[in-house]
């Protein structure tokens, strides 16, 4: 017998919170917090917080009975697990880039959804199989990896993911769309719990597992929520940062192979690395004229996402009044 949807949400939230508390308690898989004076060691497997929510909610909601929900839930689980392996060992960067792109496309083909329509506000429907496959491949690959590229200071990634949930959540409530509601809560609930532990000063790092899982959740909402155009506008900082890194570093490389974009002085202020060939990032641009400490950098990133979110919400209101949102 099917359980009420709210049971799936509550069960997922409970699993997510218990997982976060357990990781902090056991202090498993540690990494130094380089922006703190004592470089304290922090658990870096926060992605398990999102993965635990997704697994429990997927099972309790019987989401496998809906093909699109199956893709939406299982893709971040798989990509998050790849990120988890990378957090503990090392996974080649091409594998980390390929899995978020290839897995959902392969699953769509297996479920015979490659000719299913996608809709983007202000753009329209896409139903050509080749176009659909390319959109799914690119959006999952871009956003799963773009989130990971900006996970540099405490709290910014889960904070921005909570903001990204606002528009699809509003759409789901206003139009009574239960599927989009389920997708929106799958992003906002674990992101809010993760933010409580990852915000400054962090007790838990997102890790590659968290960045890839949350990035895949955002990609799924972009593709399947009908308001993906607005979510892409909201996520502009991630895309710009990713493009800057790719162009300045000469292609796809792991963090260990990148020339650092910033460095810290003895007072823990973040400075731009002005050496030729160093990677260009939004953080580097932010501190180019004036060094910042971590709290200042965090406020800068949050202000940036507050602005893009406000613009996206304003555009949503305009499109709603013009009846351009189905």
Image (cartoon, rainbow, N blue to C red):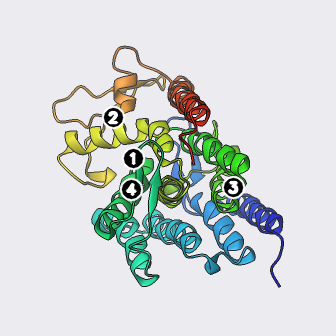
CB-based contact (under 8 Å), mark 3 and mark 2: no
Instruction: Please give the name of the residue rendered at 48% of the width and 45% of the height, measured from the top-left corner.
Output: 121
Residue at the disc numbered 3: 185
Mark toward the viewer: 3 or 1? 3
| Mark 1 or mark 4, earlier in chain | 4
Residue at the disc numbered 4: 139
Which of the two residues, 293 or 174, is positioned nearer the viewer here?
174
CB-based contact (under 8 Å), mark 2 and mark 1: yes
Q: Quadrant of residue 113?
A: bottom left
| Mark 4 or mark 3, earlier in chain | 4
| Mark 2 or mark 4, earlier in chain | 4
Q: Quadrant of residue 264?
A: top left
Q: Residues within 10 Å of mark 2 (few under 14, many from 20)?
A: many
Residue at the disc numbered 1: 149
| Disc 2 element | loop
Above or below — where is 316 with respect to 25? Answer: above
Residue at the disc numbered 2: 281
Q: Position of residue 278 (x, y in %)?
A: 22, 35
């Amino acid at each position: 017998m099917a359980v009420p949807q709210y049971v799936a949400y509550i069960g997922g939230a409970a699993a997510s919170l218990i997982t976060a508390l357990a990781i902090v308690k056991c202090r498993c898989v540690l990494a130094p917090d380089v922006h703190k004076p004592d470089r304290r060691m922090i658990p870096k497997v926060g992605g398990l917080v999102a993965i635990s929510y997704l697994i429990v909610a997927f099972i309790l909601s019987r989401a496998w009975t809906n093909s699109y929900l199956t893709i939406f839930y299982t893709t971040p689980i798989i990509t998050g697990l790849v990120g988890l392996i990378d957090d503990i060992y090392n996974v080649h960067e091409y594998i980390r880039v390929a899995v978020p792109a290839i897995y959902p496309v392969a699953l769509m083909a297996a479920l015979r959804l490659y000719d299913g329509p996608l809709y983007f506000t202000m753009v329209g429907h896409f139903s050509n199989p080749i176009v659909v496959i390319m959109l799914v491949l690119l959006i999952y690959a871009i956003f799963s990896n773009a989130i990971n590229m900006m996970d540099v200071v405490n709290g910014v990634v889960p904070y921005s993911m909570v903001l990204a949930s606002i528009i699809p959540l509003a759409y789901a409530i206003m139009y009574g769309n239960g599927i989009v509601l389920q997708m929106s809560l799958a992003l906002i609930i674990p992101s809010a719990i993760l933010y409580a532990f990852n915000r400054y000063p962090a007790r838990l790092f997102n890790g590659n597992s968290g960045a890839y899982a949350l990035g895949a959740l955002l990609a799924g909402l972009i593709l399947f929520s009908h308001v993906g155009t607005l979510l892409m506008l909201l996520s502009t900082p991630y895309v710009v940062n990713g493009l800057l890194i790719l162009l300045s570093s000469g292609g796809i490389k792991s963090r260990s192979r990148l020339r650092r974009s910033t460095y810290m002085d003895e007072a823990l202020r973040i400075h731009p690395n002005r050496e030729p060939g160093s990677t260009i990032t939004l953080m580097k641009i932010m501190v180019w004229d004036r060094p910042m400490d971590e709290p200042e950098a965090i406020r800068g990133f949050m202000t940036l996402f507050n602005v893009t979110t406000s613009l996206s919400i304003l555009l949503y209101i305009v499109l709603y009044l013009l009846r351009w949102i189905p």
